[in-house]
Image: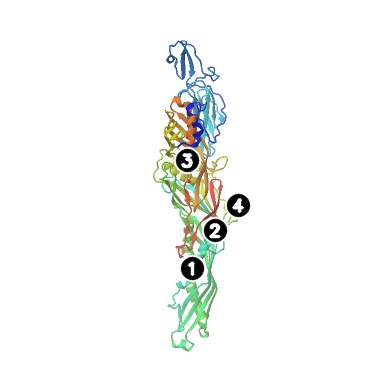
Amino acid sequence: MVSSRAAWIIGCLLVLPACGDDDVAAASGTDGETGTAGGTANVSADGVDETADDDDGEGDADNGGDCNEDADCTSDCMAGTCEAGACTLEPALTAECRPSIDIEYPPRGATIEGEPGDIVTVVGTVTTGVGTIESLTFNGEPLDVQTDGTFTVDIAPSVGGNTMIFETVDSKDWARRRVQSFLWSSSYMLPTEPMEGVAPQGLLMHLGQESIDDGDRSLPIDDLGSVFHLTLDSLDLGSFINPATPIASQAGYDIYVTSLEKDSASVSLTAIDGGMHLDASLNGIDGDLVFDCTNLLCLAAGGDSSGGLTMTAIEISADIIIGVSSDHEMQVDLTNVSTQVNNLDIYSNNIWTNFLLSILEPLILGGIVSDVENLLSGEVTNVLGPLLVDGLAGFSISAPIDFPSLADPDSPIVVQLETDVGATDFHDGVAPPRPSPTQSGLIEFRGAGYVQTATTPHENLGIPARAGCGSPDVLIAMPRIAPLEIGLADDLLNQLLYGAWAGGLLEFDLVGGDDDGGGDGGPIQVQSVKLSGMLAPTATDCNDEGSLLAHIGDLQITATIDLNGTVTDFVAYSSMALVVEIGAGDGGISINIPSIAWMETELTVEQDASIENEAFFLSILEGMLEEQLLSGLSGGFGGISLPEIDLSAIAGLPPGSALLSITVDNVERRGGISVLNSHF
């Protein structure tokens, strides 16, 4: 059924065309800026100045010429009647004779690449078949028209979507409008296959010092330091000794270490320039010694004995430099690694074996203590390093994103989101650099969206890069304030929108039907309305309001409508902006379309008899279009699930013991990015 926006029109259908707009232009705008036409140009279809021909806007009368019937009085763009053997002529409102606006450059559905600060010069022609062109406006501002009907207008384009609205009126008060759009950027991304055509800043993750290590080891785990602590705390030092093998044989004694335990582990992680600094220790190390007498001499000296060893701590210190490899994988390098043993004490419980302690100390230092030091160093290198790589790289996303299909609600459009590591930026919070970011780390993931089968018939340069809204070398920036921040860049959002567009998001039929308030046989029968989006939806905040809007430009609409038994064909072009809301969804990022900010449409009927009803058709069309777009997209433009990272396996812990999950607290907009302020 058609939209309720048309209900006010239905009651007066029987007296059409009185319900139509007096102007013949299909002028529309839900929140447009068409303005008042201004300027004067007197140009006919053949480019002849006709200023002196007729300035009053009324029909031309020609009482000369003999005639026998009305047919003798017809001429180009004039309709006549034969009265008393003489012709009386009036202008004929036809498709050929009414005003026409043609744009030579840019073409419809254009994607234009330029340099920051560039101007786009629009070139066009305006003509009319009867009378003269009285005014031409561009987005509400008057334009000068040359005597041959040509005109130019210079535009300082915005990054993303740009919509041009031209309106003209001739001396017969016949009006026309043209609505046309293009995309502009200083560079484009064209995703073809993973990882081609990526957004260099796609998904960003900021780790504040609180998320790196807040010093609190209580559960649930909420920082990387706690994961490291669990890993070291789970170390079993007893697994690195063999109580059946002596560590030394001296003076008739075989000496064994029969147990080795630690009391606790300590870990401290702090952000530094280039990565993190680690201080870790195994505390309260305690072992048992057995002195096994193996001959008569030691029996005479007292026989078997026991003892032990203690260490206050074995400490390790290292700088963990976090970077990105040439193939965009996270890599970790350890530098400035040092270990230290604090307060080693070896003792015997029997006086007759005390003489062995001085012999044992270098053996224990070079054996057991060295083994524990190597164990701790190896744990940092072989476990904690990869654990950090897996933990940070684990926030890279590879997942299908479902977008609603306006053509078939039961068959969503699947866009594959792929990301990898693009760059890292860790700081200690003090100069240099000056000013320094907070003590934290930032990881930038490149990202792109791919559709398996492209169904749109349109091709272009791809996704306009936002950059600095046209300013060179200006990148988006995270606040780096919250404990954990997840940033969805507009460029990555547009990767997904482009993938959905390529997969047929804007290739659909409007739902038609009959509307007379009572079913079949009504005065309005929508036979077909086919839509084809020439430009992909492009979201940007590069606008006067700084709000996130998804621009849809040159949505081509081809329709056939039966009105009171008269079948009318028309072609329309609609451009609009959808309000985009980025929020915290169920375990991820939600992308919602709550409303249409504005819609501008140009509509041209093909039958002369229906020209006066263009405004009526346009009202019906826009109502249907708005209703189907909002209802079809009410479930949102897909969503991105944020991963949970289970580091238990690599940490050698039971599943779920070292799980990092993200909780989103709120969402805020920064220039070019939606920031989800979060915590683990």
Locate residue 71: give its quadrant: top left
Q: Quadrant of the N terminus?
A: top left
Q: Which amino acid does label 4 sit on?
A: Pro
Q: Earlier in the sequence, mark 2 or mark 3?
A: 2
- Give the mark toward the camera: 2 or 4: 2
What secondary structure is found at the residue carrying circle 3?
helix
Per the model, the C-alpha gap separating discs 2 and 3 is 41 Å
Label 1 vs 3, first from the N-terminus = 1
The CA distance from mark 1 to mark 3 is 56 Å
- Mark 2 secondary-structure assignment: helix
Residue 435 disc label:
4
Q: What type is the residue that disc 3 sits on?
A: Leu
* Element class at badge 1: loop
Q: Which amino acid does label 1 sit on?
A: Ser
Q: Nearer the viewer, mark 2 or mark 3?
A: 3
Please state the horizontal and vertical placement of residue 20, each as a whole percent of the image.
Answer: 50, 28
From the image, tell me which residue sits under label 1: 234
Q: How crowded is mark 2: few (under 14 residues within 10 Å), some or many (20 or more)?
A: many
Q: Name the residue under label 3.
A: 629
As drawn, the label of residue 211 is 2
Badge 4: residue crowd in 10 Å (few <14, some 14–19, many ≥20): few
Amino acid beneath label 2: Ser
Mark with earlier residue (4, 3): 4
* 451 versus 374 height, above or below: above
Front one among 205 and 589: 589
